Image (cartoon, rainbow, N blue to C red):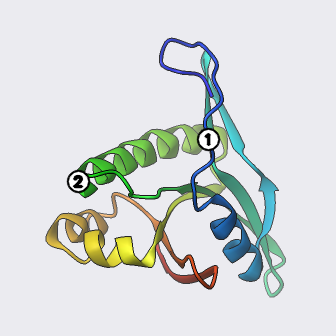
């Protein structure tokens, strides 16, 4: 992944990458990109996963991009600011490059309770600043979708 200076380096996958990937597959999604690369100007951005699900009744494809966030730093507020900032950046580029793909941030159920059930997270959800996939890392299942 390019750094801000444009020098390429490899970033480690999120610690919950495979867990979220497995949860999406269990939920009927086909992983189409791992990672999904966004090209914008001279910079490349890497979203953790791209996935598609076919809706049999309508016979139309639904496409998503999923950025996985661990929230394991000492500050949940810093993690939240980073997640929202990244979501905004990726969302704005996706609307121009792949307008049919919907962006989500995947978080553990414990993070949802600790951060998004508190006023600081609730205001973000009420104002639709971020879309979430909440997953259980032990069972590798999606608990809820928050559009």
| Element type where label 2 sits in the image | helix
64, above or below 85, in the image: below
Estimate the x, y position of residue 146 in percent, counting from the top left. Answer: 44, 75
Task: Determine the residue positioned at 26% across, 47% down.
Answer: 78
Estimate the x, y position of residue 72 in percent, counting from the top left. Answer: 39, 56
Task: Determine the residue positioned at 56% across, 13% down.
Answer: 6
Closer to the chain start, of discs 1 and 2, is 1
Task: Determine the residue positioned at 65% across, 38% down.
Answer: 97
Q: CA distance from mark 1 to mark 2?
A: 22 Å
Q: Name the residue beneath numbered marker 2.
A: 77
- Indicate the quadrant where residue 30 lies: bottom right
Residue 4 left/right relative to 100: left
* Other residues around mark 2 within 10 Å, as few (<14) / some (14–19) / many (≥20): some
> Observer-nearest residue: 23 or 31?
23
Q: Name the residue beneath numbered marker 1.
A: 12
Estimate the x, y position of residue 38 in percent, counting from the top left. Answer: 65, 35
Residue 54 left/right relative to 145: right
Estimate the x, y position of residue 92 in percent, counting from the top left. Answer: 48, 41
120, above or below 91, in the image: below
Dot label at residue 23: none
Q: Quadrant of the N terminus?
A: top right
99, above or below 19, in the image: above
* Other residues around mark 1 within 10 Å, as few (<14) / some (14–19) / many (≥20): few
| Element type where label 1 sits in the image | loop
Residue 8 left/right relative to 128: right
> Observer-nearest residue: 2 or 130?
2
- Indicate the quadrant where residue 122 lies: bottom left
Residue 96 left/right relative to 21: left
6, above or below 134, in the image: above
In this rendering, the label closer to the viewer, 1 or 2: 1
Task: Determine the residue positioned at 47% across, 56% down.
Answer: 69
């Amino acid at each position: 992944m390019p750094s801000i200076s444009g020098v390429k380096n490899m970033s480690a996958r999120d610690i919950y990458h495979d867990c979220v990937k497995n949860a999406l597959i269990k939920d009927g999604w086909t992983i189409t990109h791992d990672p999904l690369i966004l090209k914008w100007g001279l910079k490349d951005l890497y979203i953790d996963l791209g996935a598609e699900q076919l809706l049999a009744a309508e016979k139309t494809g639904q496409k998503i991009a999923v950025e996985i966030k661990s929230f394991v730093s000492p500050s949940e507020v810093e993690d939240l600011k980073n997640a929202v900032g990244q979501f905004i950046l990726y969302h704005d580029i996706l609307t121009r490059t792949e307008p049919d793909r919907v962006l989500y941030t995947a978080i553990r159920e414990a993070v949802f309770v600790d951060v998004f059930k508190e006023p600081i997270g609730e205001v973000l959800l009420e104002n639709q600043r971020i879309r979430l996939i909440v997953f259980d890392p032990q069972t590798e299942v999606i608990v809820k979708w928050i559009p």
